[in-house]
Amino acid sequence: MNDISAIPAPVTQPPTEPYLRLSNLDVTFLAGRAPVHAVNGVDLVVAEGETLALIGESGSGKSVTLRALMRLNPPRRTKVTGEIRVGGRDVMKLDAKALSHFRGGEVAMIFQEPLLALDPVFTVGQQITEAIRRHETISREDARARALSLFERVRIPSPQKRLDTYPHEMSGGMRQRAMIALALACNPKVLLADEPTTALDATVQIQILLLLRELQRELGLSIIFVTHDLGAAVEIADRIAVMYAGRIVEQGSARDIIRNPRHPYTIGLLKSRADGAMVKGTRLEAIPGSPPDLSRMPPGCAFAARCPLAIERCREEVPPLVAQDTGTVARCWRVEETHVLRTGSWSNEAEPALASTR
Ligand SMILES: Nc1ncnc2c1ncn2[C@@H]1O[C@H](COP(=O)(O)OP(=O)(O)OP(=O)(O)O)[C@@H](O)[C@H]1O
Ligand SMILES: [Mg+2]
């Protein structure tokens, strides 16, 4: 008889652990009358050098997810469960010292509003120099030389002179570049970008997006880029994850999400874009209704109340994330029917087409 253990195993690539992994992350705020379930069972992975865009309406839990990754949610009023691993480390178990190195040295964050991240009473050069010196034993001169090269890297003109300016003396785009330089000061591997271009005008937005993409390539950064803007997401991301009421409802490559969305919410978001990313000639539509109250999460799919395809099961059971033949993974019981939403109008025309499928 053949002993199968004697047969050499096929040569396969060893499974590589993604650089960043969130597993079954729950974040609940406990301060108010009822607990607010802001993040509900989020699973996300980001590989080294990969950019993931996290998109979704206001209040869907994007910022809370990023803050959880850096353990920045208020500790006494927040219950966080699940697993957060970055660079092989269990972030939930870091002690105060390890956490302060982790923030900035491993993972850094940039925000929509640089004035919140930059201190008004110090020059930007002083702030970057101090950030470096908090993490490393290095002379003030050497730290300043590093700050200067960071300013060059983020393409701030007259960098030497600009190091000595205060945040309020800079234009919005320039401030955003200075904040990116500050975020990169301690050589992080992961950059969390929370709507970093939303407050800027269109041409400056594009410049900042291009800069981030270039930095990501040159430095091999992993980036999570939070945005409401699908156009920005496509511009910068390898993959897109769509969030609704604290859950990932669909994710996939940027290309598959745009071309073959399967979740009704993703389809709704795409249809609401002015440039008609779906079918040319279809009307611009916003998704009627609003997200659920996170302190009273419905038992089933959180999108059911706004979904023209919803059936009883959708209101009763949360659908699992299932891999689709089109390449994305989507959380929807009615996924076989959602194609009607892509061509028809959001509520009216979809109805007759669906009557026979209910
Ligand atoms: N510290 C807190 N205490 C109580 N509730 C909070 C706290 N922080 C956030 N929330 C709630 O968690 C939910 C998710 O908020 P979050 O800021 O993550 O949304 P978001 O997706 O980033 O939205 P936006 O696109 O508007 O930035 C919201 O309902 C918000 O009110
Ligand atoms: Mg936010």
Image (cartoon, rainbow, N blue to C red):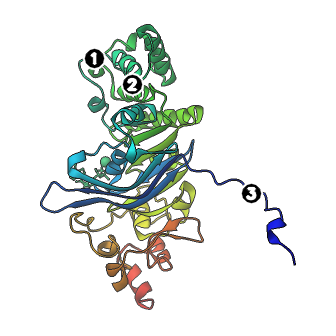
* Residue 261 visible in the shown view: no
Residue where numbered disc 3 is placed: 12
Residue that appears at 82% across and 62% down = 8
- Label pair 1/3, CB-CB below 8 angstroms: no
How many neighbours does mark 3 have within 10 angstroms: few (below 14), some (14-19), or many (20 or more)?
few
User: In this view, which residue lies farthest toward the right?
Assistant: 1
Nearer to us in this view, 169 or 216: 216
Q: Quadrant of residue 195?
A: top left
Corner quadrant of residue 313: bottom left
Residue 343 in sight in this render: yes
Q: What element carries label 2?
A: helix
> Residue sitting at 43 percent across and 12 percent down?
144
- The residue wearing badge 1 is 122
Query: Between residues 92 and 154, which one lies in front from this camera angle?
Result: 92
61 horizontally vs 344: left or right: left
Q: Nearer the viewer, residue 256 or 275?
A: 256
For badge 3, the amino acid type reads Thr
Mark positioned earlier in the residue sequence (3 or 2): 3
Which image quarter is the C terminus in? bottom left
Other residues around mark 1 within 10 Å, as few (<14) / some (14–19) / many (≥20)? some
Q: Is mark 3 on a helix, strand or loop?
A: loop
The residue labelled by disc 2 is 178
Q: Position of residue 237 (x, y in %)?
A: 52, 47
Q: Is mark 2 within 8 Å of ligand 2?
A: no
- Measured in 3D between alpha carbons, the distance from the residue under mark 2 to the one under mark 1, in whole angstroms, is 13 Å
- Residue mark closest to the camera, 3 vs 2: 3
